[in-house]
Amino acid sequence: MPSDLHGGLLAAPGGGDPFDRHLFACAIAVAFDGSGEPLTRGLGLSPEDLAALIGRYFPHSPGLLSGLSRRDDPLAPEEPDLRALLLDFRTHGLLEEVWLAHIIARRSLGSNHLWQDLGLTGRDDLSRLMRRHFLGLAELNHRDMKWKKFFYRELCQREGVVICKSPNCEVCTDAALCFGAEDGPSLLTDTALSQTRQCSGSSAKIS
Ligand code: SF4
């Protein structure tokens, strides 16, 4: 993590919803992957959106905004569609849901389970995020398909593209790929994880 995080990622008392603060703290922590890439790139947020997020949830950590380019990073080809899918199902119309749609679309480009690439503590956190902020979409995943598989299948269906090998999941040879367990360790170290959990509290600090 960069030195500004060692100075402390502090959450403002009462600064936003605690679960949302936990989500953002996890994503920020995992986006600092040691590659030296700016936080905007890791999160898929514009500098303006990142500044608004930090201002609302971690106003005592302005160092997170240092060294950012004023330009937006280029998007991967699938990002606009995945953002749009999520935004179509915003539960509350909150700005947080816009930020989360961007973060989810960017972190979905990773090679791990989505909950891992979001830095979350487990798949349950991602399911809770979806039910809380994108309820209509979460309800479409009533069979509890793997989240990334589900998103891309939804996108394909919107485009009229058939990616399924079978019209029926029960007899499909890809069932294990679509519905298998999304187990695994958190990508955050135990230390970072405990710090991130603290960050979701009222006087939190990372490092
Ligand atoms: S199990 Fe087969 S039919 Fe079901 S969603 Fe996956 S690919 Fe499609």
Image (cartoon, helix red, strand yellow):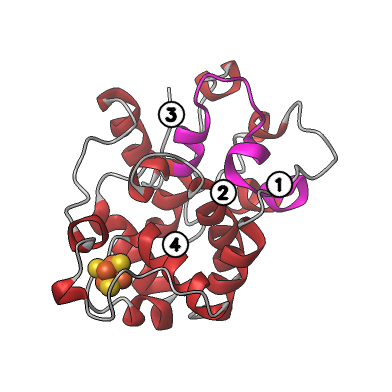
Say whether marks 1 and 4 touch (CB < 8 Å): no
Q: The magenta stretch spans which residues?
A: 27-51
Q: Is residue 207 left or right of residue 71?
A: left
Q: CA distance from mark 4 to mark 3?
A: 18 Å
Q: Is residue 121 left or right of residue 19?
A: left
Q: Residue at x 35, y 61 (%)?
A: 147
Q: CA distance from mark 2 to mark 4?
A: 22 Å
Residue type marked 4: Asp
Judged by depth in the image, the label closer to the viewer, 2 or 1, is 2
Badge 3 crowding class, 10 Å Cα cut-off, few under 14, some 14 to 19, many 20 or more, is: many
Badge 1 crowding class, 10 Å Cα cut-off, few under 14, some 14 to 19, many 20 or more, is: some
Question: Mark 2 or mark 3: which comes first in sequence?
Answer: 2
Judged by depth in the image, the label closer to the viewer, 2 or 3, is 2
Residue type marked 2: Arg
Residue 106 circle label: 2
Callout 3: helix, strand or loop?
A: loop
Instruction: Say if disc 4 is inside 8 Å of ligand 1.
Output: no
Verify whether residue 34 appears in magenta.
yes
Badge 4 crowding class, 10 Å Cα cut-off, few under 14, some 14 to 19, many 20 or more, is: few
Q: Nearer the viewer, residue 62 or 136?
A: 136
Q: Is residue 13 left or right of residue 39?
A: left
Callout 1: helix, strand or loop?
A: helix
Residue 38 lies in what quarter of the image? top right
Q: What residue did someone put label 4 on?
A: 17
Residue at the far right in the pictured view: 70
Badge 2 crowding class, 10 Å Cα cut-off, few under 14, some 14 to 19, many 20 or more, is: many
